[in-house]
Image (cartoon, grey):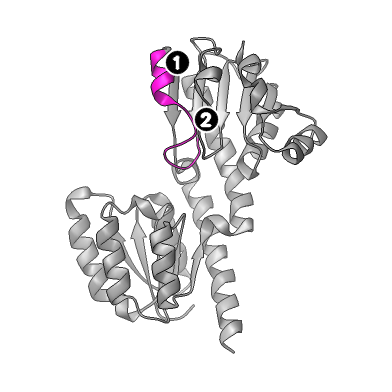
């Protein structure tokens, strides 16, 4: 990967990524957007340096950039056609912009290898959140895991390894079948209210409104809900508050709990993407 790489720093993952890339001999320019007071200044620098960038690495998710309209305007007007763009969870507007301009881009969260490796860090961080905020031990606790994708699988398996009694709630029959084959009790969301009775914790991984009032009202009042799905999550947080149940939406867990490991995951994805683009250009 030759040429300058511009990194928008939104958490420690990008800090470590910049360190890794620099040690590999790459030219890296960091623009720190963690301070809301200086975001506009950093975006002006992005506008200035973008034309000469070989690669632009945006946050995960890209919506961590506070000024989304400003960012999109800069990308549209100042991004060179041959710059490779990487980031996490691009908005539809950004995808349309990049497609229209013919810009080659990678959504880290659509890289299956990244998704699987990230799931491990997410699961470990989720367990840390449960340990910090639930009044109960994980061992012996009844815990609901909603969704059984990469993160749901990793979380369910690690919870079981710690002695929890895990129930998986999933909408699709084939997903429930997979969960059962993996040794879990798995049911449709229609059985959510029944399964919520006596559950000490609930971990939601579904980016859709699935943890609804009918489930929440059956949870014990000292239960803890951890929602790690993309914003705004899949939990009725107002309902949880009404019933006095703590419910937290916690995003970017890998960047919070395993930022350096996550940086290596991103660096390997960047290498694969750049190599693929180079082979296409030959």
| Callout count | 2
What is the number of the mark on residue 245?
A: 1
Q: Position of residue 159 (x, y in %)?
A: 66, 28
Dividing the picture into quadrants, the one containing residue 181 is top right
Query: Are the residues at dot 1 and dot 2 in contact (C-beta closer than 8 Å)?
Result: no
Which residue is at 43% across, 53% downward?
60
What segment carries the magenta color?
228-242
Which residue is at 67% across, 38% downward?
153
- Whether residue 240 is in magenta: the answer is yes
Q: Nearer the viewer, residue 130 or 85?
A: 85
One can see residue 125 in this view? yes
Q: Position of residue 125 (x, y in %)?
A: 53, 36
Q: Is residue 217 above or below residue 276?
A: above
Q: Nearer the viewer, residue 130 or 218?
A: 218
Q: Which residue carries the number 2 mark? A: 128
230 left or right, relative to 123: left
Which residue is at 54% across, 55% downward?
109
Q: Is residue 95 above or below residue 183?
A: below
Q: Nearer the viewer, residue 26 or 214?
A: 214
Q: Position of residue 155 (x, y in %)?
A: 63, 35
181 left or right, relative to 116: right
Q: Secondary structure at mark 1?
A: loop
- Whether residue 211 is in magenta: the answer is no
Q: Position of residue 239 (x, y in %)?
A: 42, 19
- The dominant secondary structure in magenta is loop
């Amino acid at each position: 990967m030759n040429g300058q790489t511009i990194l928008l720093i939104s958490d420690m993952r990008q800090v470590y990524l910049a360190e890794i890339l620099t040690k590999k001999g790459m030219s890296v320019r960091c623009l720190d957007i963690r301070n809301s007071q200086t975001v506009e200044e950093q975006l002006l620098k992005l506008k200035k340096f973008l034309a000469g960038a070989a690669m632009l690495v945006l946050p995960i998710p890209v919506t961590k950039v506070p000024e989304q309209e400003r960012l999109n305007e800069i990308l549209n007007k100042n991004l060179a056609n041959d710059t490779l763009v990487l980031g996490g969870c691009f908005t539809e507007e950004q995808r349309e912009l990049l497609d229209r301009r013919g810009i080659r881009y990678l959504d880290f969260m659509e890289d299956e290898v990244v998704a699987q490796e990230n799931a491990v860090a997410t699961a470990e961080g989720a367990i840390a959140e449960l340990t910090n905020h639930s009044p109960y031990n994980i061992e012996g606790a009844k815990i609901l895991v909603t969704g059984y994708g990469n993160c749901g699988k990793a979380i369910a398996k690690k919870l079981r390894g710690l002695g929890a009694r895990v129930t998986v709630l999933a909408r699709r029959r084939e997903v429930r079948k997979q969960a059962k084959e993996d040794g879990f009790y798995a049911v449709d969301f229609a059985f959510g209210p029944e399964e919520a009775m006596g559950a000490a914790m609930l971990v939601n991984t579904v980016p859709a409104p699935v943890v609804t009032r009918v489930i929440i009202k059956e949870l014990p009042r000292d239960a803890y809900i951890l929602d790690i799905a993309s914003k705004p999550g899949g939990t009725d947080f107002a309902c949880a508050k009404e019933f006095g149940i703590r419910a937290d939406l916690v995003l970017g867990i890998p960047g919070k709990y395993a930022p350096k490991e996550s940086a290596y995951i991103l660096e390997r994805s960047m290498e694969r993407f750049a190599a693929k683009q180079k082979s296409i250009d030959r």
